[in-house]
Image (cartoon, rainbow, N blue to C red):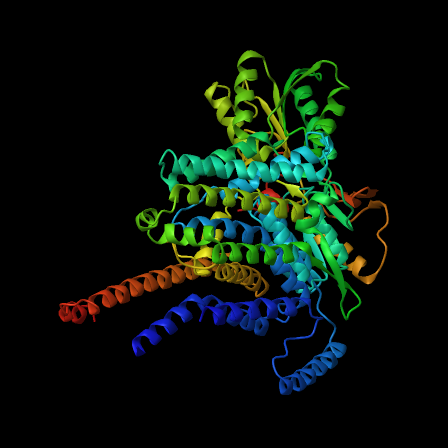
Amino acid sequence: MESNRANRVFIFVVDNLIWVFVVVSLIVFSLISKSFFTPFNLVNILSRVAPLGLLVIGQSFTLITANFDLSSESAMGFTAMVAALLLASQKNGGLGLEWNPFVGILIMLAVGVLIGLFNGVFITRLGMNNFIMTVAMLMVLRGATYAISPGKSVNFLPEAFKWLGGGALFRVPLENGKMLAIPASMFFLIFAFLVAFAVTKYTRFGRNMYAVGANRQAAEAAGIDARRVILWVYIISGFCAALAGLLDAGRMDSATPRTGAGLIFPVQAAAVIGGISLFGGRGNLIGAFGGVLLWGILDTGLNIAKVSPFWIEVSRGALLLFAMFIDALKVSYLRRTAIRKVLSASPIGLKDPIQQLE
Amino acid sequence: MKKTVTIFTFFMVLALLMASCAPATPAAPAEPQVVEKTVVVEKTVVVEKEAPKTVTIGYGAPELSGGQGVIMNGMVTGAKGKNWAVVTTNANFDAAAQANQIDYFISLGVDAIVVVPVDSQAICASVQKAKDAGIPFFTIDRAPIGCEINMTVQSDNYMAGKQSGEAMVKLLTEKYGEPKGTVLELQGDLGQNVAQLRGAGFNDVMKNYPNIKVISKPTEWKAEKFSQATLDVVSTEAVDGIYMHSDCVGTKVVLSALEQLGKKFKAGEEGHIFLTGVDACPDAVAAIRDGYSDQASSQPLPDFGVVIADYIEKTLKGEQITEGEVVKEGALWSPARIVKSDTGFMMNLATTSVDKTNASDPALWGNQAK
């Protein structure tokens, strides 16, 4: 019984290690620079990581089912470009259609869903390798974004379109007389993570996702349609990528051919740091949110502390490596305890293998 | 167990939310520490009153190769001259990264922001943020499009084109005894203001000489198009001279295209094709010294930062910037003109015509860049 409790404590600590890091990094950076722990900066961190956060939600869904979606950064850029082209005036790089912003948002979300559907169908129905399939889509969509763009950025989008990504929900007066705009994207990010957490934790679909990711054969034997579950997670990932595009285009007031380019590495890193296992079937969305926060805090904090960009890159890589290490440690630990449990319950008393395991 | 996890995490989110919404007081984890902290704050206020506050400038470079490195060094020099601190960042061609970097500047509470925009239009979202935070915003080398800032300092691209045009006329006159011949104009991206001005300056000179035939080819600043256009035109027409909208892009590839055609000769040799261009990159200045190229209109890249430092100082003191001509004895960029445009005050610095007589001048940025 005692070992069972130690086991639980270990898993609890490992699963929530991310929050220790978040708190420690907040304290460290506040001590380093007095400009770090200011309302403006904290609000900014949350609104800046919003597009990243949405991609992490999509990625977490696919990772939990032991799949990858590496195309999401390109899907984000492509959907943002599609919407911007429909909405911006000809002078600012658009097609000059200047459609209603809500129609533009609906179309971009639909395009995101279609991209996810396309990924999902090819992977589940044609049995294509999810890694290579989404890498192909990463290249196809990035190229297509360049192809449909006017060769430069598309700017000055309608207010209603920009609101979610760059608008203020309300303004708070600061003591120096200035007003602090509380961005809508900050609340949207938190809301999105809560919804995603609820879906993965409290719905049958969410439980099926974990089951498929942990052991696909066992899940299928238990009557779960794994292919259907995987198709849906790709659709969700595409949808999230479109939302990320909406947030980013709103914040920048423009879509560029490079929107989202290179984000896939931070996305994977934030998800893994947040405890989403690359082996599938483990991790929760609240942890992933922690991963996104930690990424944003490090990004801003190291910049404010005036650390050289090269060392920032090194520290990110080191963090990712550490997260992978913890993940691998956790998985092997769980495997060992599971085997031990089975062996000790064995009626013919297999003591020797247990000793070998020690 | 699961409940504790959920409760724990929810508290974390809540704490962060509250921290970010709270007014600008430092973190106060427990009562006794608050007392300590206020004492410290009072102390620093006293110190600030005695010593003058150092001015900090946030500088955002779009990338750091070639000319942009020279421009950034100029900004650092300009700030040093005023005893200011500079925080420099590099966006590496990424407009989103530049937007983030400007957020850092605002978080840091810099006194002024100077940026070379990666994207002239996308920068406007950041300009608005800086405006909301009450921080003056300047750009050098490139102007924003679609929003108003305090000031832009850039080089006079029309003048640069004009200087290259005049040099070309002089070279052709020396060759034939009168201004005539065929000139190939390798244009930049005509969607950009810079290329339009460099073309207009050149062609406004050329249209006074009806015997000079100008063949214009768009290249979109792409080296392979510079090369292709040179190969196509020089092999079919008797070209006397080539004018490049950017000798940074053009010098090497145009010279190697001429070599391919067997037409690369030094100045003074039979069959030499005149080369003029705008920018005066290290390549171009070296080619002028070696005799393969004839003229380049040099932008005062190292001076951008030094010149704008004066106007930042003015703005911080609350003085007005005024329109008109600015003359500074001995400066390569003098005379310059300040005009009020719809993107704020715009200062156009004079360019310097470089030929073999002054190609070794260390004041030229082409001789400073590594």
Q: Can you give x and y, in whole percent of width and height, for residue A238 in the image?
A: 52, 42
Q: In this view, does B25 lie above or below B260?
A: below
Residue B109 lies left or right of residue A3; in this view the side is: right
**Residue B298 visible in the picture:** no
Along the viewing direction, whichever of B14 and B356 lies nearer the viewer? B14
Q: Is residue A115 above or below residue B304?
A: above
Query: How many numbered marks appear?
Result: 0
**Residue A124 visible in the picture:** yes
Along the viewing direction, whichever of B155 and A194 lies nearer the viewer? A194
Q: Can you give x and y, in whole percent of width and height, for residue B258 in the image?
A: 51, 22
Location of the N terminus of chain B by quadrant is bottom left
Q: In this view, does B123 lie above or below B179?
A: below
Q: Can you give x and y, in whole percent of width and height, for residue B222 in the image?
A: 56, 30
Along the viewing direction, whichever of B361 and A74 lies nearer the viewer? A74
Q: In which quarter of the image is residue B83?
A: bottom right
Q: Can you give x and y, in whole percent of width and height, for residue B249 in the image?
A: 56, 33
Q: In which quarter of the image is residue A181?
A: bottom right
| Residue in the picture at 48% in, 62% down | A287
Residue A118 lies left or right of residue B95; in this view the side is: left
Q: Is residue B130 above or below residue A90?
A: below
Residue B176 lies left or right of residue A306; in this view the side is: right
